[in-house]
Amino acid sequence: MRSAECGVRSDGWSVAIWLIAAVIALAFSHQARAADPLPFKLETYRGHVVFLNDALAKRYGITTVPEAADRSLALQTADGALVPIVEDVRGRAFRVDERLRKPEVEILARKFQGVPAVQVIRLFEVTKDGKLELDYWCDICAISMVELKPCECCQGETVLRRRKVEE
């Protein structure tokens, strides 16, 4: 039987064939996705977070335009390599809170193929006594955040929290 409106068969066979085709297509697309490698690797970097323009001026004598002075961030490793940091909410934390630019830090980051910048996933301060994980904490709501700002729940003050990491 055909529908008068669209000329498509409306018997059970058409629906069954369509469902089988959809299941097969879904299975092949899932298999293709599972075979693809992740678009990034997790990597660990150690160093100090700096403004990229300052590091370029000190190391190479490159001057940037004034409006770039406090925009781009990088992790400067012990050997002087500069690893640009993607400024999402975790990356922005380094610009907003200067306390994060002072100590030696270790970051766990996503390194995407073909992209020089890294996306910070976790942040640690490196001390003589070991590593401390850094985040921002609201004592009222007992929630953590990744950048210095009012609590997302109560809008109260948050504090920089340092927690010892057991290795």
Image (cartoon, rainbow, N blue to C red):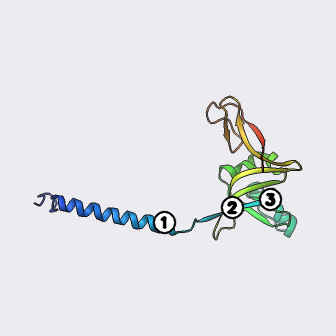
Q: Position of residue 91 (x, y in %)?
A: 70, 53
> Local crowd at mark 1 within 10 Å, few (<14), some, or many (≥20)?
few
Identify the residue under disc 2. Answer: 118
Residue 110 coordinates in the image, percent (x, y) = 66, 60
Q: Residues within 10 Å of mark 2 (few under 14, many from 20)?
A: many
Tell me which label, 1 or 2, sits earlier in the chain: 1
Q: Nearer the viewer, mark 1 or mark 2?
A: 1
- In percent of the image, x 14 and y 57: which residue is there? 5
Categorize mark 3 by other alpha carbons within 10 Å: few (<14), some (14-19), many (20+).
Answer: some
Quarter of the figure with residue 24: bottom left
Q: Position of residue 28 (x, y in %)?
A: 40, 68
Residue, disc 1: 33
Marks 2/3 in contact by CB < 8 Å: the verdict is no
Q: Earlier in the sequence, mark 2 or mark 3?
A: 3
Q: Tell me if 76 is positioned left or right of 117 in this view.
A: right
Residue furthest to the right in view is: 128
**Identity of the amino acid at label 3?**
Arg
Left or right: 58 in relation to 12: right
The residue sitting at the front extreme is 167
Residue carrying label 3: 46
Residue under the point 15% across and 59% down: 11
Disc 1 residue type (three-letter): Arg
The residue mark sitting in front, 1 or 3, is 1
State the SS at label 3: strand
Q: Is residue 15 left or right of residue 57?
A: left
Whole-Å distance between the Cαs marked 1 and 3?
A: 33 Å
